[in-house]
Amino acid sequence: MSETDDKHAVPDMPDTTGTITMEVARFRPDRESEPSWDSYDVPLRKEWAVLDGLNHIKDQLDGTLSYRWSCRMGICGSCGMTVNGEPKLTCSTFLTDYAPGPVRVEPLANFPVIRDLVVDIEDFMAKLPTVKPWLVSGDEEPAEDSEYRQTPAEMDDYRRYSMCINCMLCYSACPVYALDPDFIGPAAIALAQRYNLDSRDEGNEDRRDVLASAEGVWACTFVGECSVACPKDVDPAGAIQRYKLTAATQAVKDLLLPRGAR
Amino acid sequence: MTTKRSPEPFAWLLFSSGGMAAAMLIPVLLLLFGIVFPLGWLSAPSHDRLAAVLTHPVTLLVLFGLCVLALFHWAHRFRYTLYDGLQLRKAAPVIAVLCYGGAAVGSVIAAFVLIRAL
């Protein structure tokens, strides 16, 4: 090995010249009633993510494998799957971290499986608009050339929650959602808070009925797995806890104060 | 999806203030009376002095508040342990009555014990 190679060598990197076995959950509803496992040996390269392994299988080994992906750079939120039991974005989960293997790839937990690694996300898609995750403005339309100015501090209030990419890893990680499918869930509540805490938004009261319901924040028991699973560091558990305090304060006000003073 | 207002915020406020009160007061009390005084790191207050502090109405009120909040903290947590941990969601109303009812009974007992100290 030359001196230059030595300098660029990454210490403690597992051997990247061999292969790794990927055990992939298969489910073909037209042919079988229960999911099964297929094993594939794929090249183990240090720059290969689990998604690259799946693409290798699809292109070279078995074209019948179905899974969702798009951007390969952790922003589209399509490629969430269960890797060795944990919900992960497969495009940013590297095969070398699981060497010598095998790596088990399953569909996201807590969602019905359509085929192989593709899950039905209809439940989340139906819940998301109920929290109105958009800027709700008052009756007064702004003048044509006006701007909604915001200070950096005002932006910091919601910025973290705006990083959500709707990948649904948090739903897959949430034990409450597993037990109670009516729970609105971590991402939807974090996205509601993204707008509630935005200085330009006036939709707090519109979102309250859904957020402060038994299926809203009150279903959460603060297990915190959503924030562990989140690949974008959104901290949905923190968003939910913050809204619990908001909702509880409002509930006390509703009880104690006359309607006009709330 | 129902959007019924839930009584949960009040249970949660008792739960969270109970957790806060217990976390702030109980470790200090355990440290002082369980370790520091028995090991003689600090000289323990005399019995008369401690009795005077304990029978002061303000102390009794603080202790009563701590007991009530800690009991409701327990009730809320235990309720969810039974709901989710043991998967007893079907018995939810019974569990809620038993847990919060137990905390209420405990609060009455605490009041009784503390009033007797007056």
Image (cartoon, rainbow, N blue to C red):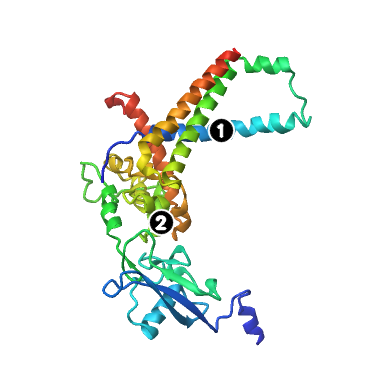
Q: Visible in this render: residue A202?
A: no
Could you tell me which quadrant the C terminus of chain B lies in? top right
Name the residue type under label 1. Answer: Ala
Name the residue type under label 2. Answer: Cys
**Quarter residue A200 falls in:** top left
Cα distance in 3D space between marks 2 and 1: 31 Å
Q: Residues within 10 Å of mark 2 (few under 14, many from 20)?
A: many
Q: Please provide percent x and percent y for residue B109.
A: 52, 21
**Number of numbered discs present?**
2
Whether pointer 2 and pointer 1 mark residues with C-beta atoms closer than 8 Å, the reply is no
Kindly state the secondary structure of the residue where label 1 is placed: helix
Q: Which residue is at a point 44% across and 49% down the rendered structure image?
A: A237
Q: Please provide percent x and percent y for residue B63.
A: 57, 23
Q: Is residue A220 above or below residue B94?
A: below
Q: Please provide percent x and percent y for residue A53.
A: 44, 78
| Residue tagged 2 | A170
Q: Please provide percent x and percent y for residue A252.
A: 37, 29
Q: Which residue is at a point 44% across and 46% down the rendered structure image?
A: B86
Q: Is residue A110 above or below residue B21?
A: below
Kindly state the secondary structure of the residue where label 2 is placed: helix
Q: Which residue is at a point 74% across and 28% down the rendered structure image?
A: B37
| Residue tagged 1 | B22
